[in-house]
Amino acid sequence: MKPAPLVGRNSGRNSSTTQTTTVQVGNTTVGGTDLFIVGGPCAVESAAQLEAIANHLGPNRGNGHIQALRGGIYKPRTSPYDFQGMGQDGLSLILNVSQRHQLPFVTEVMAIDQIESLSAHADMLQVGSRNMQNFDLLKALGKVNKPVLLKRGLAATIEEFIMAAEYIASHGNPNIVLCERGIRSFDNYTRNVLDIGAVVALKQLTHLPVIVDPSHAAGRWELVASLSRAAIAAGADGLIVECHPDPDQAISDAQQTLTLEAMAELVESLKPIATAVGRRVAEPQRQLVAA
Amino acid sequence: MKPAPLVGRNSGRNSSTTQTTTVQVGNTTVGGTDLFIVGGPCAVESAAQLEAIANHLGPNRGNGHIQALRGGIYKPRTSPYDFQGMGQDGLSLILNVSQRHQLPFVTEVMAIDQIESLSAHADMLQVGSRNMQNFDLLKALGKVNKPVLLKRGLAATIEEFIMAAEYIASHGNPNIVLCERGIRSFDNYTRNVLDIGAVVALKQLTHLPVIVDPSHAAGRWELVASLSRAAIAAGADGLIVECHPDPDQAISDAQQTLTLEAMAELVESLKPIATAVGRRVAEPQRQLVAA
Amino acid sequence: MKPAPLVGRNSGRNSSTTQTTTVQVGNTTVGGTDLFIVGGPCAVESAAQLEAIANHLGPNRGNGHIQALRGGIYKPRTSPYDFQGMGQDGLSLILNVSQRHQLPFVTEVMAIDQIESLSAHADMLQVGSRNMQNFDLLKALGKVNKPVLLKRGLAATIEEFIMAAEYIASHGNPNIVLCERGIRSFDNYTRNVLDIGAVVALKQLTHLPVIVDPSHAAGRWELVASLSRAAIAAGADGLIVECHPDPDQAISDAQQTLTLEAMAELVESLKPIATAVGRRVAEPQRQLVAA
Amino acid sequence: MKPAPLVGRNSGRNSSTTQTTTVQVGNTTVGGTDLFIVGGPCAVESAAQLEAIANHLGPNRGNGHIQALRGGIYKPRTSPYDFQGMGQDGLSLILNVSQRHQLPFVTEVMAIDQIESLSAHADMLQVGSRNMQNFDLLKALGKVNKPVLLKRGLAATIEEFIMAAEYIASHGNPNIVLCERGIRSFDNYTRNVLDIGAVVALKQLTHLPVIVDPSHAAGRWELVASLSRAAIAAGADGLIVECHPDPDQAISDAQQTLTLEAMAELVESLKPIATAVGRRVAEPQRQLVAA
């Protein structure tokens, strides 16, 4: 495997340590002791949808809360005839909920011309699996002063994944969080195969934080909690999980989406696992929710 | 599998026929009786390199000639530190050779901002495997009046591949040629696995021309000729093959690149196969080569 | 890749040549100029079924005939509750048809204790994909004086496949024919992916005959003829194809089974392809069919 | 997915419960609260090798001990020229150490004719990945009164794996433990991909205990501890891990083998994870070691 001069371990600023680079996402730090738990819908659908999530899982909830909100406003879909996301209208909705609840949000950027408006408002920009080797997008994100959540391609090797991060870093942006989200395989009981070994390998080969998306990996909500616990036990720095006030009504990914109650329970169940591996589920910092 | 309203067979303009849509690429027709054989280097490197290829395989050669030239000027590479292509300088080189030899050329477009200059000069724009689901690029190519060579993603399903073509077609450009170029698998003797069954399936499920890239599929030059013959026997409408005046000196893909002599021999060997399946290797139309 | 001392090319008896070892199967030679076309049902079901096939495709048919009959009497099935084959009763049926029509037959051996009776009667013993690395079975077949048709495992590397043949050869039996029959992959439009590159590689790396099973590779009858032509164009020494007098009534593999008419047409269509690559579809030797 | 009448959940003896069937292996119970940790070498090599392991990790050790010993005496190897195991001599060695240390042992059975002597002495019979669909072997093990450790095939679907267990159960032996050991995939940084989602799915779809082999999954010792913790967090009932007094001298699998010190540390590190998911690492029951 070719060495990655900037994001590789034993290279660059973190040479000869086992430390993880920390990445600041809004008011939250990724890669330190506290886990980074992101929750939210596949796609932003309405203000009520996001408000329910923030109320249930945001910083004012006693337990089971999340550190950031996810929600797609530009959606990469296999068919051009499927719902492609709410676009700028969705951005206003998620920005409003994010600000009132003091809950940072991450959303996917699919094209260079979306970077300007998204980076002005979002706390973290996600590169989806299909764009992991969209090198011009990666280069453009290297010039942005926002953290990037880089999802692994469906059939990307570990080396290709690391080198995709190196594209961003070598163009000037060191604030990268890697996300393992399942790879394509021959069985179709699960949607993809969570490559838990890759999580461990990425932590050893790079100094970047690594989080796991168990929802897309499994494609079945009933596997998500167990996979989340496995990810934290393996050393992941966090999770990004699909949840929705009413999964059966979700426009996309209904099958893999947790209810808000299940999401809160999942977060609670992570506490002893986190402790066992020297990590912590952060205590919520209650916030004043603006009207 | 979801139906593809525009590129699917039994739909759109070619309903109830087994006909293939023909796509005009420069002075050549793809999808008719004549096979469409594209040859050239992985990357444009120099005028001498392209001139040698055009002299050896262009329309003035008696036998073993090609219908179009390939050559990357923007190169998607796993590492940001590898050669990324000659860019606009390369475009001038390939355009010059193409025009003097009356040999159309195809080159890869990696980003929306390259479309304008490439579509002004190239005869066909290639979307590489890594960008097969770069939907914003596909939509932009839907608005261009140039044929698109769409390569299958490394782990794209047949449905995803067809739907990627549908993105281009539904945005206004019906001139699409599909290219099977090998999929990722577990064995590493070959670089990828040529999914010859997908070639047959794509011909049955769509009315688009389908060509095969045996070079990237095999990753070994010694397999390329046999795979090419298999592709034509399976019903492919053409081939895109890497060849170079001096493969060992090629900047990239040396291992899978044919010599010009081997390329010419390969084309000759296709003639009886083509005849066996009702196709033809076109006779060269001698051209006056400008100085 | 480790060298294979006995079955590898540039080793053993066939060093420094490009010749293929020929294997005698009943009255037929595999690996010479003539292609070896095997047809028949997934499972032996009845005398009438086999008689219809032999009448339609056997040596007394003018055209479109086969060189050997296939038919499982012991069937490996995913579920223990599915039909497991007719066993010894099936052996009598296929032996009778084989002898009267002078049509050699190949059938699968699943266990060491079946070798004795099968090798007494069958012309060729097949090792199925699931048993490709059942090393004790391979060793036992190394001691038998019958040719072995070794099918590639669903996820066997080319090296593992060659070394499985080496197990048989190193235990004393050099009469081995390799069979590529599709590998597992991520797409499920086709049942498996025909690894046509492996066919070419196996011919280069070993001196054994290599045949192709397009039926299991595709899992869809409508792809079988095109894949068969591709296989011969790629250099395969033959084919093993599932066909049945009434595919819709076949106990297993109905979806991938050709009618007898389609099978005969397929064989005819191979003639010009075979010629193009220096091979031949053998002319039938009319036989006297015993009552 | 077809229902599995005997091993499937919501079927047979464990219908409408979430309980796991317990399987007795020597003096140890698999599938209850206590985890089942198996350790030992890839292959039995010498008395000293096994004695060192039993001394270091057996029941007389204060902490970090294992519940059973693994060690192959018949070894399935890709090449017929590689070490094939010590055979019966190895059986005597492992039996002696097992008895003196009161440490049950599991060893692989590759062929029906090995069942009699192995089942007379071993506490558990392992079916290796290559034999997961060696149906005659499975049927024969269905008639044996010993627990079976069934390893998943390299490219077996979850359904095929469950149905392989059903072969054993339907022939009379309900004492089956499933083992996920990594599946084949496209990346070669790790030897295989640990399908952690399959572990969760198998626990939901069957009532059988499920353990994980992180050594073969990873193929790299430095990933084994993290994968082990992930497996327990995901709900696995135990682990089977390769360890050796001197991994660099191991005849096979050196790269993926832990030292005995690393193995003991790994077991200790599982304790808080086990507690977090309602399980326990058993306290050692000190035994009198016979001379």
Image (tube, coloured by chain):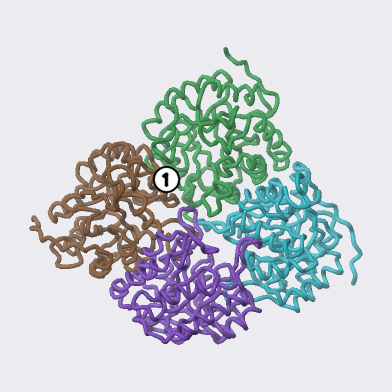
Chain colours: A purple, B cyan, C green, D brown
Q: Quadrant of residue C132?
A: top left
Describe residue D106's horizontal placement relative to residue B194 as left or right.
left
Q: Nearer the viewer, residue A240 or A81?
A: A81
Describe residue D192's horizontal placement relative to residue D142 as left or right.
right
Q: Nearer the viewer, residue C205 or D69?
A: D69
Residue C286 x/y as whole percent: 66, 20
Residue C60 to residue C168: above or below: above
Residue C276 to residue A237: above or below: above
What's the residue at 82%, 56% (across, down)?
Answer: B29
Which residue reaches farthest top?
C291
Would you call the spot at circle 1 few (<14 residues within 10 Å), some (14-19), or many (20 or more)? Answer: many
Residue B89 x/y as whole percent: 76, 79
Residue C135 to residue A201: above or below: above
- Per the image, the residue denoted by label 1 is C133
Q: Nearer the viewer, residue B135 or D167?
A: B135
Answer yes or no: is residue C229 visible: yes
Residue A219 x/y as whole percent: 47, 60
Q: Quadrant of residue B260?
A: bottom right
Q: Nearer the viewer, residue B153 or A11?
A: B153
Which residue reaches farthest front?
A291
Residue C28 to residue D268: above or below: above
Quadrant of the frame with the C terminus of chain D? bottom left
Helix, strand or loop at label 1? It is loop
Answer yes or no: is residue C194 visible: no
As shown in the figure, which amino acid type bears the numbered disc 1?
Gln
What's the residue at 55%, 70% (across, down)?
Answer: A45
Which residue reaches farthest right?
B288
Subunit ID for the residue under disc 1: C
Describe residue D219's horizontal placement relative to residue C224 as left or right.
left
Residue C78 x/y as whole percent: 43, 41
